Amino acid sequence: MTGLKINLAKASNFVSDNEIALFKSEIELHRSKIYNKTGAGNDFLGWVDLPSAITNDLLAQIEGDARKMQEQSELVVVCGIGGSYLGARAVIDALASPFSALQTKQERKAPLVIYAGHQLDEDYMVHLLELLNKKDYSVIVISKSGTTTEPAVAFRLLKSHLEKKYGEVGAAERIFAVTDASKGALKKLATAKGYSTYVIPDDVGGRFSVLTPVGLLPVAVAGVDIRQLVAGAKAMEEFLKKEDRFDHNPAALYAIARNILYRKGKTTEILASYNPSLSFVVEWWKQLYGESEGKDQKGIFPAGVGFTTDLHSIGQYIQDGLRNLFETVLTIETSRQELEIPVDPDDLDGLNFLAGKRIGEVNRMASLGTMIAHVDGEVPNLEVIIPSLDACHLGELIYFFEMACAISGYILEVNPFDQPGVEAYKKNMFALLEKPGFEKETQEIRKRL
Ligand code: PA5
């Protein structure tokens, strides 16, 4: 049993028990394709048993390198994009103080993790290098293919900066690479320079890789207990595998509900959180579902909002705009901190009706009120509930979303594990940048400028 629950009650006007029941045999089929590795993309199913397969030796190695970085660095730059960055950031941001950048290393009990290689903004890189002039730092460079342009460009700059600052040997002590076992430019470079290197298994795609060193190394550096994260994921892995009653299996239920809604014209799913610390969990989820399902001219468009903030902006659209939306609300049952609203003897702001209540209770009432309002506005609401925000429950949540994504992709009849669409922009960018081998494309694209 795990702590995570799924609540479909606020979608019952749109998703009936009878409709769910029609999926029984289909879910059995998809589960068998996933566990027996017989479905589309079956060479990318390594994530299914990652939590239970991860070895103590690997965890100890990650913890050892994390300690080394913690000792030698005030900052650690994680250099990666997409699946090679979002999972780590999701976990780190979820568990850190929202003001961790303003804390000292002693207060944080860990270096500050910052990011590079997730975009190509020149100003960002200049500011980053200026900051790094003044700080002791290490770099974790992550790229499965080892050839992705954004992290490769950023890493070239970071490597050169580190080598100038610490010398070639000193820099090699501060660079940790996570990449393919044998292929790609990063692997070649890491071997030539003697960097400490971790392998991303061949059968785990980027967006499913958070429970490999891709996610675990940065998360460990940030001071998160990776054994708890893996334990939560493992509990979810075992629970979902054992729970073969499709209508008791939360991953199956979530996958079924979103596909029923999609078939009724609800083509955009908004993942809503009431905790700003979950904003990168939302970003990670957007990549997981967008890259897995958006293909063959179909798929639910994954969007994200942070409430109550966005209720004062995009909330208007959700309540009253085009009715192609459904929401999935991420609920954290218990806050980590407690804060009561004080009594004010003058009550000039008229808020004494809230005195003595916790902020979390006000947030929960905002959430319940919003769900009811949105359901009244014909936006069905699904709810994913975890008891508290800690490493173990995040592990459960990650694995839950991964399994639900695989099932949902199979219901949608797409291969959830490839991403052919992300190559199109790369081809044009290489042609425009005159990459060797793209001469014909360069000529063609120039005519279109
Ligand atoms: O999920 C994916 O496969 C992608 O988002 C990749 O993670 C992303 O493009 C980065 O690729 P790589 O790790 O090869 O640099």
Image: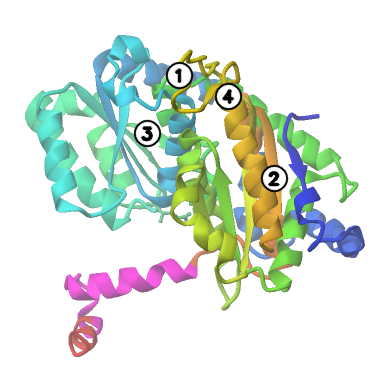
* Helix, strand or loop at mark 1: helix
Q: Which sits in the foreground, 354 or 201? A: 354
Res. 83 in view: yes
Q: Residue at x 69, y 31 (%)?
A: 234
Res. 230 in view: no
Q: Give the vertical position of 134 relative to 443 (above or below).
A: above
Earlier residue among tags 2 and 3: 3
**Residue 181 horizontal side relative to residue 115, left or right:** right
Q: Which sits in the foreground, 45 or 232? A: 232
In the rendered image, the residue lying farthest to the left is: 164
Give the residue type that dot 2 points to: Glu
Give the residue type that dot 1 points to: Glu
Earlier residue among tags 1 and 4: 1
Question: Pointer 2: what residue?
Answer: 383
Q: CA distance from mark 2 to mark 4?
A: 26 Å
Question: Pointer 3: what residue?
Answer: 197
Neighbor class of circle 2 (other Cα within 10 Å; few <14, some 14-19, many 20+) is many
Question: Pointer 1: what residue?
Answer: 63
Image quadrant where one finds the C terminus = bottom left
Q: Which sits in the foreground, 206 or 285? A: 285
CB atoms of marks 2 and 4 within 8 Å: no
Q: CA distance from mark 4 to mark 3?
A: 54 Å
Give the residue type that dot 4 points to: Leu
Earlier residue among tags 2 and 4: 4
Earlier residue among tags 4 and 3: 3
Of marks 1 and 2, the one in the foreground: 2
Q: Residue at x 14, y 31 (%)?
A: 131
Neighbor class of circle 1 (other Cα within 10 Å; few <14, some 14-19, many 20+) is many
Q: Which sits in the foreground, 83 or 258? A: 258
Q: Give the vertical position of 42 relative to 74 (above or below).
A: below
**Residue 354, which numbered label?**
4
